[in-house]
Image (spheres, helix red, strand yellow):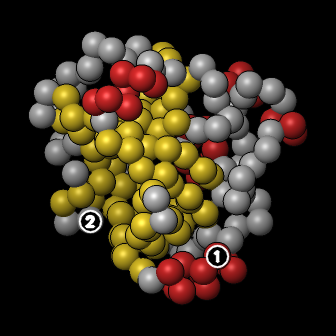
Amino acid sequence: MNINNMEIERKFLIAMPDMKWLSAVAAYTEITQTYLRALPDFSTNRVRKRGRGGVYTYTHTRKQHITDVTRVELEDEISEREYLELLSEADPERHTIQKTRYCLDYAGQTFEIDIFPFWTTQAYMELEMCAEDQKIEFPPQIRILREVTADPRYNNSELARKIPAEDAFSETSNLTWKG
Protein backbone atom coordinates (compact mmCIF):
# COMPACT_ATOMS: atom_id res chain seq x y z
CA MET A 1 0.00 0.00 0.00
CA ASN A 2 1.43 3.36 -0.99
CA ILE A 3 0.39 5.94 1.62
CA ASN A 4 2.00 9.38 1.41
CA ASN A 5 4.57 7.99 -1.06
CA MET A 6 5.67 5.27 1.38
CA GLU A 7 5.90 1.72 0.09
CA ILE A 8 6.05 -1.05 2.69
CA GLU A 9 6.71 -4.37 1.01
CA ARG A 10 8.00 -7.88 1.70
CA LYS A 11 9.42 -10.13 -0.99
CA PHE A 12 9.62 -13.91 -1.32
CA LEU A 13 11.22 -16.40 -3.65
CA ILE A 14 8.59 -19.08 -4.29
CA ALA A 15 8.40 -22.39 -6.12
CA MET A 16 6.91 -21.95 -9.58
CA PRO A 17 3.17 -22.05 -8.96
CA ASP A 18 0.80 -24.29 -10.87
CA MET A 19 0.18 -21.99 -13.83
CA LYS A 20 -3.22 -23.50 -14.67
CA TRP A 21 -4.42 -22.74 -11.12
CA LEU A 22 -2.80 -19.29 -11.03
CA SER A 23 -4.29 -18.29 -14.41
CA ALA A 24 -7.74 -19.34 -13.17
CA VAL A 25 -7.63 -17.36 -9.91
CA ALA A 26 -5.49 -14.28 -10.65
CA ALA A 27 -5.54 -11.45 -13.15
CA TYR A 28 -2.31 -10.87 -15.04
CA THR A 29 -0.47 -8.12 -16.86
CA GLU A 30 2.72 -8.01 -18.92
CA ILE A 31 5.47 -5.69 -17.67
CA THR A 32 8.55 -4.32 -19.39
CA GLN A 33 10.77 -2.53 -16.89
CA THR A 34 13.88 -0.50 -17.77
CA TYR A 35 16.19 1.00 -15.17
CA LEU A 36 17.52 4.46 -15.91
CA ARG A 37 20.74 6.13 -14.85
CA ALA A 38 20.81 6.97 -11.15
CA LEU A 39 19.38 10.20 -9.78
CA PRO A 40 20.69 11.98 -6.67
CA ASP A 41 18.82 10.89 -3.52
CA PHE A 42 17.13 7.88 -5.18
CA SER A 43 18.21 4.24 -5.02
CA THR A 44 16.28 3.33 -8.18
CA ASN A 45 14.99 5.19 -11.21
CA ARG A 46 12.91 3.27 -13.75
CA VAL A 47 10.26 3.37 -16.45
CA ARG A 48 7.63 0.72 -16.92
CA LYS A 49 5.30 -0.34 -19.71
CA ARG A 50 2.38 -2.34 -18.32
CA GLY A 51 -0.66 -3.94 -19.91
CA ARG A 52 -1.64 -6.58 -22.42
CA GLY A 53 -3.36 -7.01 -25.75
CA GLY A 54 -1.91 -3.77 -27.12
CA VAL A 55 -3.33 -1.60 -24.31
CA TYR A 56 -0.53 -0.19 -22.15
CA THR A 57 0.11 2.37 -19.46
CA TYR A 58 3.51 3.93 -18.80
CA THR A 59 5.04 5.05 -15.52
CA HIS A 60 8.23 6.71 -14.30
CA THR A 61 9.17 5.62 -10.76
CA ARG A 62 11.86 6.79 -8.36
CA LYS A 63 12.48 5.02 -5.06
CA GLN A 64 14.52 5.96 -2.01
CA HIS A 65 15.59 3.19 0.39
CA ILE A 66 14.52 3.76 4.02
CA THR A 67 14.72 0.20 5.46
CA ASP A 68 14.76 -3.25 3.86
CA VAL A 69 10.96 -3.18 3.96
CA THR A 70 10.15 0.53 3.49
CA ARG A 71 10.91 2.95 0.67
CA VAL A 72 9.75 6.37 -0.47
CA GLU A 73 8.18 5.85 -3.89
CA LEU A 74 7.44 8.65 -6.35
CA GLU A 75 5.51 7.36 -9.34
CA ASP A 76 4.07 9.35 -12.23
CA GLU A 77 1.99 8.13 -15.14
CA ILE A 78 3.64 9.30 -18.36
CA SER A 79 2.76 9.23 -22.05
CA GLU A 80 4.16 6.67 -24.48
CA ARG A 81 6.24 9.46 -26.04
CA GLU A 82 7.74 10.39 -22.64
CA TYR A 83 8.42 6.70 -21.97
CA LEU A 84 10.27 6.33 -25.28
CA GLU A 85 12.27 9.49 -24.59
CA LEU A 86 13.26 8.29 -21.10
CA LEU A 87 14.50 4.99 -22.57
CA SER A 88 17.43 6.99 -23.96
CA GLU A 89 18.57 7.36 -20.32
CA ALA A 90 18.68 3.57 -19.75
CA ASP A 91 21.41 2.37 -17.41
CA PRO A 92 23.89 0.57 -19.70
CA GLU A 93 24.82 -1.83 -16.86
CA ARG A 94 21.28 -3.24 -16.60
CA HIS A 95 19.10 -5.25 -18.95
CA THR A 96 15.44 -4.55 -19.51
CA ILE A 97 13.31 -6.91 -17.41
CA GLN A 98 10.32 -8.70 -18.95
CA LYS A 99 7.86 -10.37 -16.61
CA THR A 100 4.26 -11.42 -16.29
CA ARG A 101 2.64 -10.27 -13.05
CA TYR A 102 -0.30 -12.10 -11.51
CA CYS A 103 -2.31 -10.28 -8.82
CA LEU A 104 -3.70 -12.85 -6.40
CA ASP A 105 -6.22 -11.76 -3.76
CA TYR A 106 -6.17 -13.94 -0.66
CA ALA A 107 -7.40 -13.28 2.90
CA GLY A 108 -7.81 -9.54 2.29
CA GLN A 109 -4.28 -9.20 0.84
CA THR A 110 -3.07 -8.80 -2.74
CA PHE A 111 0.00 -10.85 -3.61
CA GLU A 112 1.91 -9.90 -6.75
CA ILE A 113 3.54 -12.94 -8.34
CA ASP A 114 6.13 -12.22 -11.02
CA ILE A 115 6.99 -14.90 -13.56
CA PHE A 116 10.32 -14.21 -15.29
CA PRO A 117 11.53 -15.90 -18.50
CA PHE A 118 14.91 -16.68 -16.91
CA TRP A 119 13.46 -18.93 -14.16
CA THR A 120 11.68 -22.21 -14.79
CA THR A 121 11.35 -23.60 -11.26
CA GLN A 122 10.77 -20.48 -9.17
CA ALA A 123 9.05 -17.11 -9.18
CA TYR A 124 8.99 -13.94 -7.13
CA MET A 125 6.16 -12.77 -4.88
CA GLU A 126 5.64 -9.37 -3.25
CA LEU A 127 3.13 -8.13 -0.74
CA GLU A 128 2.57 -4.43 -0.09
CA MET A 129 1.53 -3.87 3.50
CA CYS A 130 0.16 -1.17 5.78
CA ALA A 131 2.88 -1.63 8.43
CA GLU A 132 6.25 -3.39 8.66
CA ASP A 133 4.95 -5.74 11.37
CA GLN A 134 1.71 -6.66 9.57
CA LYS A 135 0.82 -10.35 9.91
CA ILE A 136 0.77 -12.19 6.58
CA GLU A 137 -1.54 -15.08 5.75
CA PHE A 138 -0.08 -16.94 2.76
CA PRO A 139 -2.16 -18.79 0.16
CA PRO A 140 -1.76 -22.54 0.81
CA GLN A 141 -1.15 -23.18 -2.91
CA ILE A 142 2.08 -21.12 -2.80
CA ARG A 143 5.28 -22.78 -1.57
CA ILE A 144 7.69 -20.20 -0.18
CA LEU A 145 11.35 -21.06 -0.70
CA ARG A 146 12.66 -18.15 1.35
CA GLU A 147 12.07 -14.51 2.17
CA VAL A 148 14.33 -12.22 0.11
CA THR A 149 13.19 -8.82 1.39
CA ALA A 150 16.62 -8.02 2.86
CA ASP A 151 18.62 -9.70 0.08
CA PRO A 152 19.55 -6.98 -2.44
CA ARG A 153 20.31 -9.61 -5.11
CA TYR A 154 16.55 -10.07 -5.51
CA ASN A 155 15.63 -6.43 -6.05
CA ASN A 156 14.39 -6.11 -9.61
CA SER A 157 17.04 -3.46 -10.21
CA GLU A 158 19.71 -6.04 -9.34
CA LEU A 159 18.04 -8.86 -11.29
CA ALA A 160 18.35 -6.50 -14.27
CA ARG A 161 22.09 -6.50 -13.67
CA LYS A 162 22.73 -10.12 -12.68
CA ILE A 163 20.64 -13.16 -11.85
CA PRO A 164 21.98 -14.92 -8.74
CA ALA A 165 24.00 -17.88 -10.09
CA GLU A 166 22.27 -20.49 -7.94
CA ASP A 167 18.93 -19.37 -9.37
CA ALA A 168 19.62 -19.14 -13.10
CA PHE A 169 18.52 -22.07 -15.24
CA SER A 170 21.78 -21.69 -17.16
CA GLU A 171 24.93 -19.68 -16.83
CA THR A 172 24.17 -15.96 -16.64
CA SER A 173 26.30 -15.31 -19.74
CA ASN A 174 23.99 -17.60 -21.76
CA LEU A 175 20.77 -15.88 -20.73
CA THR A 176 18.77 -14.13 -23.40
CA TRP A 177 17.58 -10.77 -22.14
CA LYS A 178 14.57 -9.28 -23.90
CA GLY A 179 14.20 -5.60 -24.49
The picture places residue 105, in percent across and down from the top left corner, at 21, 35
- At label 2, the amino acid type is Asn
Q: Which mark is residue 87?
A: 1
Q: Secondary structure at mark 2?
A: loop
Pinpoint residue 64: horizontal percent, then vertical percent.
43, 62
Q: Callout 1: helix, strand or loop?
A: helix
Residue in the picture at 46% in, 59% down = 53
104 versus 145 height, above or below: below
Look at mark 2 in the image and give the residue it sits on: 5
Camera-nearest residue between 159 and 142: 142
Which mark is first along the chain, 2 or 1?
A: 2
Which percent across, then down, holds residue 158?
63, 47
Residue 10, compared with residue 38, is above or below; it is above
Q: Amino acid at mark 1?
A: Leu
Q: Residue furthest left?
A: 108
- In this rendering, does residue 116 appear at all? yes
